[in-house]
Image: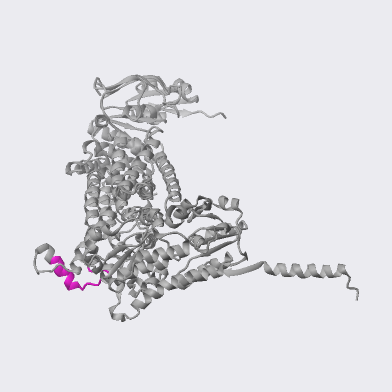
Amino acid sequence: MVFGIKHSLLILLVILSIVKASFALTYTLTDKLGRSVSVEIPVKRAVVVITYELIPALRVWDQVVGVSMWAEKSCDLYRAIVSENPSLRKPLVGAGSNLNIEAILKLAPDIVITWSYDPENVRFLEKRGIKTIAIYPDSLTELYQVIRMHGRLFGKPNRAQELIREMEGIFDLIEKRVSGIPDKMKRKAIHIGGKPNRVSCGIGVTDDIINLIGGINPAGKIKKRYADVPIEMIVRWNPDVIFIWGSAGYDTSWIYKNSQWRFIDAVKNRKVFKLPRWSTWSPRLAPISLYMAEKLYPERFKDIEFESLTDRFYKKLFGISYHKVKEYERF
Amino acid sequence: MKDFKILIMVLSPFLFGFIALFLGAYGINAKDVIKILLNETLHVFHIEDTPQKAIVLDIRLPRIILAGLVGAALSGSGVTLQGIFRNPLIDPFILGISAGAAFGCAICVGFLNFIPIQLMAFIFSLLAVIISYNIAKGQGEVSRLPLILSGVIVSAFFTALVSIIKFLVDPHRLQAIVFWLMGSFSLSDWDSVKIAGVGIGLSLIPIFFMRWRLNVLSLGYEEAKALGINVKLERLLFIGFSTLAVSVATSLTGIIGWVGLMVPHLVRMIIGPDHRILVPLSFFAGGSFMIAADTISRTLTSFDIPVGIITSISGAPFFIYLLKRGGKEVWGR
Amino acid sequence: MGKIVLRVKELYFRHRNNGSDILKGISFFVSSESITTILGPNGSGKTTIFKCLAGIWKYSKGCIEVHDKPIERLDLRERSRLFSLVPQEHEPAFPYTVFEVVLMGRAPFIGLFSSPKKRDIETANEALRLLSIEHLRDALYTNISGGERQLTLIARAIAQEAPIMLLDEPTSHLDLKNQIAVLKKIRKIAKERNITVLMTLHDPNLSNLFSDKVVVIDSGRKIAEGRPFDILNEELIKKVYDLDVRMLSLNGKRFLAPILDS
């Protein structure tokens, strides 16, 4: 046996390098466009296009190098946090629907997390050697998957799980109070979007939430994400409550003033509500759902103090108070 | 035979409109519809204020009338511009109306939210044509080729501006621009009908009275001049009125293609190029085509199909059929 | 043939962007109810004179008088009541019927917001009869022969009821038979309707046969003016067309035959 010191060192080095290599983990996933993407995790230089609310939630500011313009322009949460802590502000890479490729390249990201709205954008980035993941959660389950995926990518799987737990906490609260409602007594709710006759249909997070809060989505029969429907169809459905998308260009007064809607129960009973202007692809989906549940079955949520509950949620998940964020709301 | 064809075309919008009152997602049975109509017009049968009544009189009826007016405007403009440009393949958006309207909509949605979209779309569609016309005028006489070219340039320019605005605008407001551009009658109400009635009426009526002039103008600049026609002025009037009609229509319902190009062309193939008959028939045919297309778009499935899809799908095969059957008579070349 | 109905004095014309004069001081006169031909080689300025007369182009210098009254101040419509223009036959934009084409000649009488009335329709029908083309009334202008198209355009000018008819090369796209037929027709209607005819031709023999007066133009200048009998001769043709011809007599008429080198 000629195991001299030199040999032992050599063997040790080999073993160490193997061990080190296996610590550089690779995460392989299939994104919404069906593409298989392999990424070394945890990512250190991510560009986040649409799920920016997860940045404060997962506390991964130092692993993110860029966000889309939409974070600054339409997300009160992001705006509030970076205004209070300017050092956290990230460079912008263009609009979510029109990414600035040069800006992205300049940041030399190791991953770009965007949405599948424009597959061309994704392919373009791919061709230039930038790893891209495209998401589009079409259900609550898929949303959880997206949050977990973010957790793994950033090396914070436990934190991601915690986020989901907090969300479930609110969902459980809601479900407990509406589970007893028999199908015949369930109330009908529709969610209208960019145009008053553009309804959220059977595919998507919104439909799941309407069901979760014990409501029935009459547009759920249409197996699409959204559809433009004739006004008389809405009259026929006769929803009890109408929710208007938070970022719609019109508000409840438009509906109330419009004589074509006057026979709908939601209009007769003044049950048209505009949702808060928050992203639904984020943990904030939970308080949005609570808001909707309250409006749909007010008698079952009388004792809930929405603001204080949401404030606790914010502080736990995002580290900032509900009222502070509200200051940064823009219409 | 010709008179029969004319009669059919004139009656068709009213026929289609009447039938369309009975069709819709709500499902009202025919007897009730008739009762509602009789009650409204002749005040017989006491009818309560029910959802059915609201649907027939406040939702379907204004939508049908608006479709008829917009169809007449698009088709009437199309036939006018085809006559002026002596080209049967011109559509009313060629001088930049659609790009101008899109720009007006984008600016409004993006920055000037407090001004109604319709007004901005209308103003900028007119502006686009005025700019096109003035660019062409710089060449001396406003002849056809410079006018078409400047229309193309102005369209391209405004379209580029729209892209820039889309880039700068809040993503959620962005959707409103996209929706508006895809023409639709879903949100038709009596207010839109009133605006359309006045705006489109004020533009189509003068065109109707001037229609014989289109025959003479189609002879070309020099021959028309030798017949004592002030060609520049009359062209300007025709372009002005047709632009007004299309601008009003577009500002109310967004951009709907094909109708302005295809309907006048089809009517000309059937009835001949004499504008004395061609112009009024284009109004009626355009109206009925639009009513039919919109009715299909709102009753085929449980949701609204964009009406532009219906117009292009239905127009094309009919067009091909007439083309095959036609030949020299049809094209005149 | 009587008094002078049209007088052109020192007419100059140049295009706006171009430097040189196309018409260099043309003067001639036309007597009422006569047929006058403007004769000249290609590019001599014949069509330009017509466009100036009809008001399509603005001449730079000179004066045009009808019945001793200058016409500069007249607007387009008033001009069109004096002059009717028959262009060379051409492809139209749309397939109008012969009747619809002739009806267009009534434009000077129909207001902007009006349509043709009974009188206009009658006048158009009259014109068709005069030209003996009533059988073509509902035929498509695009389907008839070149000669028939020329007759249609002449009928349109008749419907215009203007005392002076300008015909720009009425025979250029026609075969011999049609050339003769059309010119005969022109002569007939000039007589029946007491219309003064001014036409351009480039065949001296045809002008000889069919005109009362000839005005010879070359390079924007008038070379000669007078009765064909008096002025059409071998020297003139040589000067204007640079062509050797021999004059022959037949049935009291003069013909100019080109001589080719053997």
Q: Is residue A164 left or right of residue C262?
A: left
Does the stretch in magenta take in B309? no
In the picture, the quarter occupied by the N terminus of chain C is top left
User: Residue lying farthest right?
Assistant: A2
The segment highlighted magenta reads B22-38
Closer to us: C124 or C240: C124
Q: Is residue B254 left or right of residue A25?
A: left
Q: Is residue B283 left or right of residue A102?
A: left
Q: Position of residue B77 (x, y in %)?
A: 31, 48
Q: How many marks?
A: 0
Q: Residue at x 58, y 69 (%)?
A: A29
Q: Is residue A208 visible?
A: yes
Q: Position of residue B68 (x, y in %)?
A: 25, 57
Q: Residue at x 21, y 62 (%)?
A: B58
Closer to us: B262 or B276: B262
In the depicted structure, whether residue C250 falls above or below residue B46: above
Q: Position of residue B206 (x, y in %)?
A: 23, 44
In the picture, the quarter occupied by the C terminus of chain C is top right
Q: Is residue B61 visible?
A: no
Closer to us: B82 or B155: B155
Q: Position of residue C33 (x, y in %)?
A: 26, 27
User: Which color mode does the image show?
Assistant: one colour
Q: Residue at x 31, y 38 (%)?
A: B236
The answer to which image quadrant residue B124 occupies is top left
Does the stretch in magenta take in B27? yes
